[in-house]
Amino acid sequence: MGKAYYEEKRSGLASEQFAMAKDLDPNDPTAWFYDSILLQSENRPVEALQAQQKAIALNDNRGVYRSRQLLDKDEAARNTASARIYSDLSFEKMAINEGTKALENAPENFSAHRFMADINATQPQRSLAVESELLQSKLLQPLNTHTLRPQLSDLQLADGPARFSYNEFNSLFTHSGPSLLIDGFIAENSTWGEDVIVSYLHNRFSITLGQYHYESDGFRELDWLEKDTLTAFAQFDITPDTMIQVEYTDDDQKNGDLNQHFFTDLFSNPDFKAEAERQDIRLGIRHQLSPGSLILGNILHSDNTFDQEFGFINTLADDKLDNGELQWISTFNDIKTIIGGSATDFESIITGGGNITVEQEYNRFYLYAFVPIMQEVKLTIGATYTTFDETVNRAFNLPNGDVLSLPSEDKDEDQINPKLGITWDITPATTLRLSAFREARRFDDDLTLEPTQISGFNQIFNDFSSKVIVDSKRYGFAIDHKINLNLYTGFSVLSADRSSEANTATGEKRLFDSNRELAEGYLYYTPNKNISVKVDFDYENYSEPKEAFPPNILSLKTYRVPVGIKYYHSDKLSTEILATYYNQNGSYLLPDQTEITGQDNFWLFDSSITYNLPNRIGKITLGGKNIFNTSFNYEDRSNNTAFLSSKQDTNFYELSPERIIYGKFILHF
């Protein structure tokens, strides 16, 4: 009954029904879970978090994504992502622990994958991991009208429309009929964006059509961007056990040099201009073999064209990619297993002073098992086996009109990548996570159904550079602790030893070793139901060999400490103030082989105020970034537009180089 009142937007009656259910069955997490959704929708995220924690405690101490009630099978309830509560509080790091447990306990749960996508979407260099989680979620999801908006499918992480969660206003019931979502964004520097999505559900069929536009003149003359995306998505339940879906995406992007460098005048290219067009068509299938066994299949064809200008140098690339993946998820005596494989064929023709033809075949086979050693300890064990075949033919135009053809370059490699992770609930309030794994990926847009993390440590990073990471060994340690119901803390470290393939200054292709160290910490506090406070700590130490071309960054050490407070005035209004300390020092190599160093430390202040519209139809936000217009030098490794890549965080600017005032809205009907 409480869910029905929630649907009718009669919050008072819904709250009474949930309270009654808690009294009648104090050990059932269902009422607590739905009450947390109600509280979050009323702009009461602190109370929503406490209700969610109570539901988790009643549900064997793991994340709640569906009711235990056998009669409560309405799949739409799962689509109310708990990640939004953490996002409202800006407690994203704490959510990783719960999301990890959810995926270990239920890798077939679509909302757990959507949960991890929401959390990872707040982090730079995670677009590939987020899109892979979203792909898995789409293949596992039931029929609904809440599929992703176009810019979220492409993960444009600016301060634009995408910063609102995709499922923020979802219904608790799945019902036939249309759905409309509109959101928009406007800021200084002629920056604006909008997207519209229309969905319709009827019986066993749903369809979604969407469009997205974003443009900005940027902070510098060369820092402009224009992007358009069109999407079409259809899903059909052939039988209760078999589903098929078809998705089409058309991306068109034009931009200048979007990179934010420490020495902007030395490394930025005012003559750089790029245009990329991409068309994807995807076919997905899901078949439930039995209650504990299901098959997922995905086929993708992608056509990409890239045109980049470096002053008098023009480079054009025409790429074609075909990918197919099959996966089996099963349960044997409480052991969850994921077995799968994928095959990718890639062909690229690059022109500009000559012709370069690249043909690649890349195959992956993987096995993962989530083994409960005891109730408090979960072991993740697995391995992948990869094969890679490549043929490169190069021909260059000589000044006299002749063509110089170089010998064909052939490569044939294979590699085994072991995976190991442990999640241990030392006490109900303390969780330890350990991981050690090896990983290598060949494509920046290699979306996968394979698990994206090992015990909460992400194993898929975007590395937007000219170098291909052919081997990476990573070791992680983390601990999360709930001091009490209002105070949470934790920290994690991750070390990665990498081998990258790159050209030397003479054109010779070689392997180079590099290292990346990450450390994170957090302290989250909710002193009362109206206030949330956070202190985060992020550290990255990154190094590259001097011989790799182009090196640019030899070493880079970055400290980041965000301190934020949110105040929830009422069920409609909330404000946030965020102060972030940055300290960065690095060593750089100029084209003439001169080494230079740079160091800067500074504070940036951001603020925003959000108003929730009545009847949960949307919200409006007015905010400012870098409100004191602080000048600084900073190297942002979130994206690199100097090299050909179809999937980049081109809208993700970690720092605003100047004060910017923005407004955004979202409406859902």
Image (spheres, rainbow, N blue to C red):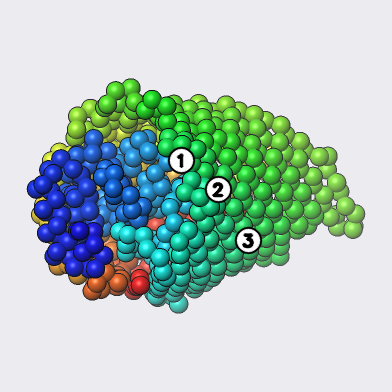
Query: How dense is the environment of label 3, judged by Cα within 10 Å: few (below 14), some, or many (20 and up)?
Result: some
Q: Which mark is residue 285?
A: 2
Tags 3 and 2 touching, CB below 8 Å: no
Residue under numbered circle 3: 279
Alpha carbon separation for disc pair 3 and 2: 20 Å
Q: Is residue 643 visible?
A: no
Vertical side of 264 occupied by 190: above or below: below
Query: How dense is the environment of label 2, judged by Cα within 10 Å: few (below 14), some, or many (20 and up)?
Result: many
Inspect the image, locate mark 3, and give the three-letter code of the amino acid beneath it: Gln
Vertical side of 530 occupied by 215: above or below: below
What kind of element bears circle 1? loop
Residue visible at 55% across and 67% down in the picture: 230
Inspect the image, locate mark 2, and give the three-letter code of the amino acid beneath it: Ile
Q: Quadrant of residue 177?
A: bottom left
Tags 2 and 1 touching, CB below 8 Å: no
From the viewer's perspective, is the residue at label 2 or at label 1 nearer?
2
Residue visible at 42% across and 27% down in the picture: 332
Residue under numbered circle 1: 452
Residue visible at 33% across and 22% down in the picture: 373
What kind of element bears circle 2? strand
Give x and y (percent) for residue 495.
42, 33
Q: Quadrant of residue 3?
A: bottom left
